[in-house]
Image (cartoon, helix red, strand yellow):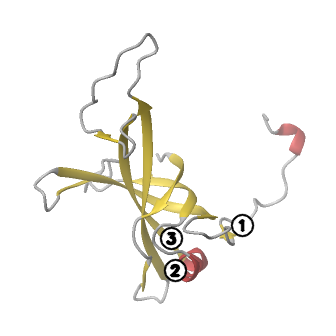
Amino acid sequence: MFQRVTLIGHVGQDPQMRYTPDGVAVTTISVATKETISKSMPGGGERSCPQGWKESYNGKSWELTTWWRVTCWRGLAETVNQYLTKGQQVFVEGIVGGDAADGTQNPRVWTGNDGVARASYELTARTVKFLGGRGDAGGPSMGEPPPETGFEEDALPF
């Protein structure tokens, strides 16, 4: 069993590429996604801060950042390593992986330097599209090859 995830976020650090003993390229990146809710309540007044959220820079909303550890393999790993840099915005589609030995899809949990518990989710990328960021106008994208032919398009449910 697996879960497909689609996310848009910003790269948290430059890609880190390595090779397996068999010579297969593997690149990891960290991607931050952010959810924002307004402090203002529809009927007036202000919403209290949800647990774990922080105040935005402009002071008008609450923000929650979620970190994703994204692993890319083979040609996708090489392309991501070559073209992505810290701060760029990316679209990533992939499969959630777990950190637990029993294969469950739990986040990786650790304690930050400030003593606060933190967590990140593991994702094996199938598609990465470079959306730009830091003045870039976007770039190439890589992903899975198109599906094999041999199916009838009329049989698709969409």
Residue type, numbered disc 1: Pro
Left or right: 98 as drawn, with respect to 101: right
Residue that mark 3 sits on: 72
Instruction: Tell me if residue 152 comes above or below residue 79 in the rendering.
Output: above
Identity of the residue furthest to the left in this view:
115
Q: SS of the residue at dot 3?
A: strand
Left or right: 28 as drawn, with respect to 98: right
The image position of residue 36, as x and y in percent, is: 43, 37
Residue that mark 1 sits on: 145
Q: For label 2, count other residues whose C-alpha is less than 10 Å away and answer few (under 14), some (14-19) or many (20+).
A: many
Label 2 to label 1, Cα distance in Å?
Answer: 19 Å
Question: Which one is closest to the eye, mark 2 or mark 1?
Answer: 2
Of residues 9 and 98, the one nearer the viewer is 9
Residue type, numbered disc 2: Asn
Instruction: Tell me if residue 36 comes above or below residue 106 in the rendering.
Output: above
Q: What residue is rendered at 62% in x and 70% in y? A: 136
For residue 81, the mark is 2
Label 2 to label 3, Cα distance in Å?
Answer: 9 Å
Question: Which numbered disc flags the more N-terminal residue, 2 or 3?
Answer: 3
Q: For label 1, count other residues whose C-alpha is less than 10 Å away and answer few (under 14), some (14-19) or many (20+).
A: few
Query: Mark 3 near mark 1, Cβ–Cβ under 8 Å?
Result: no
Q: What residue is rendered at 44% in x and 58% in y? A: 123
Q: SS of the residue at dot 1?
A: loop
Label 3 to label 1, Cα distance in Å?
Answer: 15 Å
Question: Which one is closest to the eye, mark 3 or mark 1?
Answer: 3
Q: What residue is rendered at 58% in x and 62% in y? A: 126
Left or right: 36 as drawn, with respect to 150: left
